[in-house]
Amino acid sequence: MHFTGQVYRHPIEARTPLLEVTAGCSHNKCTFCTMYRNTPFKLSPLSHVEEDLIEMKSMGVEIKRIFLVNGEPFILSTDKLVEISNLIHKYFPEIETITCYASVKSLKTKSLEDLKKLRKLKYNQLHIGLETAYDPALKQMNKGFTQAEAYENIKKLMDAGFEWDAIVMMGVAGKGMSDINVKETAKLLNELPPYLVSIMSTSVSVGSELEVLRDKGEFIEPTEREMLEEEKKLLELLDFEDAYFFGGHVFNLAPINGSLKIKEKIIKEIDNYILKLDDHILNGTYQRPNI
Ligand code: SF4
């Protein structure tokens, strides 16, 4: 298999076969992210993609779901994504879902017709790094899109028949900004409900732009307690039930997952973690190792 540099996939895809179609991330500028800083973006040759599919086929297993790596394969042209899916269908005609990370920035490059075409080819359940729908935080995190663009492009995605995973970051707007951050984010999720809500705690990675902003006093880190309270507030504001809540990211101090149908139970579980954790942890900020 061809894999270049460090490879990332959503934790919920732990059992999904990975297929490299790009290396690095075409954006590679999010303030908090150092994942691909040392891996230049490039498109994998189709010959490599096909060789990997042949190798996967030789294992003799059925593949119904596949996850394209790396950072943001959905930035590839529609024609290229069609070519990749044609290869996948050639070796795995049973395929039901082709998924990957995506961003609102990559959705901006696709028309409704493009998205409908890709949906027919089984692209679905994209993991979208929304992080927040609060405009000042989107700007500070240098996500490459605005709140208005998030509404417009996620609606277009849903109109094309896609389900989507909303990856949202607790604490991303900084200390004292939880209320506005969750209010704006929950409003978008309620209007454009995802099938999955994935929560990640904000951590200032060594070597990130966010570290520079923090050291200059332009980003004030929320405490761990604030991030857990923010998670509870977000859950309280969500008005849809037909989705799964994934809080099991390694960055999260309360690794809780479950259907939004039982969100009151999830909120209670977060409260239990708050009761169990030491005050010096809850009232401080914890730098996770760079991933
Ligand atoms: S968060 Fe995602 S889109 Fe942003 S730089 Fe990292 S991999 Fe790229």
Image: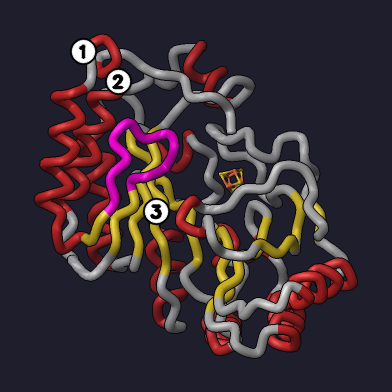
Find ligand 1 in the image and state its quadrant.
top right
Which one is nearer the viewer's eye here, 245 or 219? 245
Ligand 1 is within 8 Å of the C-beta of the residue at disc 1: no
The residue located at (23%, 24%) in the rendering is 225
Magenta stretch: includes residue 37? no
Mark with earlier residue (1, 2): 2
Q: Is residue 132 visible?
A: no
Q: Which residue is mark 3?
A: 147
Q: CA distance from mark 2 to mark 3?
A: 25 Å
Q: Which residue is mark 1?
A: 279
Q: Quadrant of the C terminus?
A: top right
* Amino acid tagged 1: Asp
Magenta stretch: includes residue 256? yes
Q: What is the quadrant of residue 158 in the picture? A: bottom left
Nearer the observer: mark 3 or 1; the answer is: 1
* Amino acid tagged 2: Thr
Residue stretch in magenta: 247-257
Nearer the observer: mark 2 or 3; the answer is: 2
Q: Which residue is mark 2?
A: 223
Pinpoint residue 78: horizontal percent, then vertical percent: 68, 77
Decide if residue 278 is on the left or right side of residue 174. left
